Amino acid sequence: MADSRADDVLRRQSQLEARRSTWEGHWSEIAERVLPRQQDFQAKRVGGEKLTEKLFDSTAPLALERFAAAMESMLTPRNQRWHELKPPEHLLSNPAVKQYCYDITSALFRARYAPTANFASQANENYMSLGAFGTGAIFVDDMLGRGLRYRAISLAEMFIAENHQGVVDTIHRRFEMTARQAYQKFGEDLPESIIKCLHGTGSDPERKFEFLHCVKPREDAEWSRLDYKGMPWASYYVSFEGRKLLRESGYRTLRYAVSRYVTAPRETYGRSPAMTVLATIKSANEKEKTFLRAGQLAAEPPVLLADDGSLGPFTMRPAALNYGTLAADGAPLARPYETGANLPITQEMLNGDREVINSAFLVTLFQILVDSPDMTATQAMLRAQEKGALLAPTMGRQQSEMLGPLIQAEIDILAHAGVLPPPPDELMHTELDTEIEYVSELSRAQRSDEGLGILRTFEQAGPLMQMDPEAALLFKGKVPEIIRTLGDINGMPSKLMNTPDEIEALKASEAQAAQVQQALAAAPVVAQAAKDMAAARAMTGNEEAPQVVSQAA
C-alpha cells in the first residue's frame, strides 16, 4: 500500500515538472541578472560557485532588494501590529469578545516574532521571490514545545496546481537532505541504501538524497475520525531513493501560503516586475558592458606606431620617461587611437534603462515622499492616496493569497497547542468566526482619500461657516470623532488619545473642579454679606437679621 501511494505521488510530480518546464528557462534568465543566488532551476549549483558572471549592471538586484523592503513596510512591518482580529457584526459591541480577539492577536504576534520563529527574514525572502519570479511560498511548521517556525520555499523546489476556483491547493516540494539530516527527521523508516550511508565502512553521512513533500486536499477523508485521516489536507513524504513512502499525515489548515504577484489567463505560476522589464534589464547589462569598454579605451587607448622598427620599447606608466619617442621636428612617433565614442550619450541611455527598472520595482513610487520632505500634511496625504491606489491591486492579492492562509494556519497551530487564551462565556457553546482587519501602512494609504475628504471639507466649509454660523452645527459634538479618525488614518498610536470612558471621567473631574472654584469664588462675598448683616443687627437690635443672612447664605 505504501509503495502504491509513493508511486502515485511521484507520478503526479513528473506531470507537474513537465508542465513547469517552460517557465524554468524564463526563471533562469531572470536569476542570472536579478537574483543570482537562485540560479538552480535547470542545473544544480555547487556550493561556492560564482553566480555573477552575466551581471554587469546592478540596478535590477538593488531594485529587487528595495522592492522587498517596500513590500514588508507596506504589508508586514515588523515594528507594529499589521492586522487585527475582529468579532462578527453581532458581537462587535461585546467587551469580553472584543478583548478576547485582542488577546488572540497579541498571542499571534508574540509567537510570530519569537526569536526561534524566523518570520521576518523568511517573509523578506518570499517578497524577493515575488519580485523576481512572480511566485513565492512560506511554510509554517509546528515545533513541538517551541512554537511556530517559518520557511520560505525556493521556487526551484516548488511545484503547484490550482483547483477549479483558481486557488492553489496542491503543493509539491522537491528538496535535498543529507543522509544524517534524513535520519534525524525520519529515523529507521528510510530506505536501506540511505541507512547504510550512516554506518559501517565507507559510510558517507553527508551524501545528499532527494525527497518529496506533497500536500493536497484529502480525497478519502473520513470526517468522523479524529486522526490525520479525518483532516482536510493530506501530507506525504516520499523518498526518490527506493520510491518509498516515509510518512503520511495531515493538516487541519493548509500550511503552505502560496502567493503570486500577478497571473495571466490560463497560467498557474505568477508573473513578476522582473519579467515585465526583462528586456530592459538585458539592455542595461549590454550598455554597461559597452560603457565599460568605451571607458577603458578612453582611459587606456591602443597606441599607434609606425611600421619601421625605429622606435624601441617604451612604458605607459605614469610619469615614465621614454627617450626616442619624438622625431627631430618634435612630432610624436607614437599616437593613441581615438575611438570617437560618445560616453555621455551612452551614460544617458543607461540612466534611462535604470529609471524604467526602478519604476517596475516600485522604487520610484516609494522615493516620492523621500525626495519631498517639506510637503504639507495635505500634500503628504495626497501622495499616500496615490500610492495606495497604485498598490492596492498588488498588495491586496498578497493579503488574500499569502497573509490570510498564513494567519489561519497560525491560529490553528496555536489553538491546538493550548497557547491561545480561553474564550469568554459568550463563546463557550459557539465557534468564533473572526474577520481579519489589516492595519498596515498599505491600509492607511488606501484610507488616505477619507482623510483628504475630511481636510478638504473643513477647508471649504470655513468661509461658509463665517457667512452662516449655524452651519457649524453640522460638526458640533463630532470634532473628537473626526480627530480620532484622522489619527487612525495617519497611524497615530491609539494609546496617545483618550478613550470615550476617559473623556467622560475628565469631563466629570473638570465639572467638579469648576464647582469647587465657584464655591471658593463665592466664599468672600458670603462672608462679607454675613459681616454686614451682623453689623446691621448690632446697630438696630433686630434679632431676625442673622436668620435672613443665614438663609441668603
Image: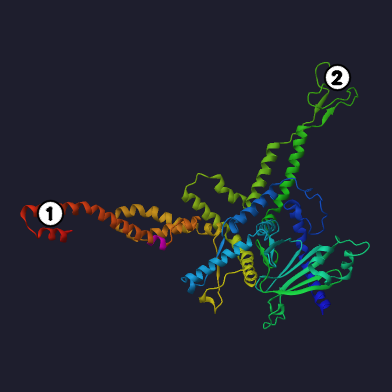
- Asked whether residue 361 is in view, the answer is no
Local crowd size for mark 2, using a 10 Å CA cut-off: few (<14), some (14–19), many (≥20) = some
Q: Nearer the viewer, mark 2 or mark 1?
A: 1
Local crowd size for mark 1, using a 10 Å CA cut-off: few (<14), some (14–19), many (≥20) = some
- The magenta region covers 500-504
- The percent coordinates of residue 342 (x first, y second) are 71, 36
Q: Mark 1 points at which residue?
A: 534
- The percent coordinates of residue 397 (x first, y second) are 61, 63
Amino acid on which disc 2 is placed = Gly
Q: Mark 2 points at which residue?
A: 324
- Which corner quadrant holds the N terminus? bottom right
Residue 229 shown left or right of residue 448 in the figure: right
- Asked whether residue 119 is in view, the answer is yes
- Which corner quadrant holds the C terminus? bottom left
- Please state which of residues 76 and 291 is positioned toward the viewer in this rendering: 76
Amino acid on which disc 1 is placed = Ala
Residue 168 shown left or right of residue 240 in the figure: left
What residue sits 21% from the left and 51% below the top?
524
* Label 1 SS: helix
Residue 271 belongs to magenta span: no
Please tell me in which quadrant of the rendered image residue 318 appears: top right
- Please state which of residues 319 and 274 is positioned toward the viewer in this rendering: 319
What residue sits 73% from the left and 40% below the top?
291
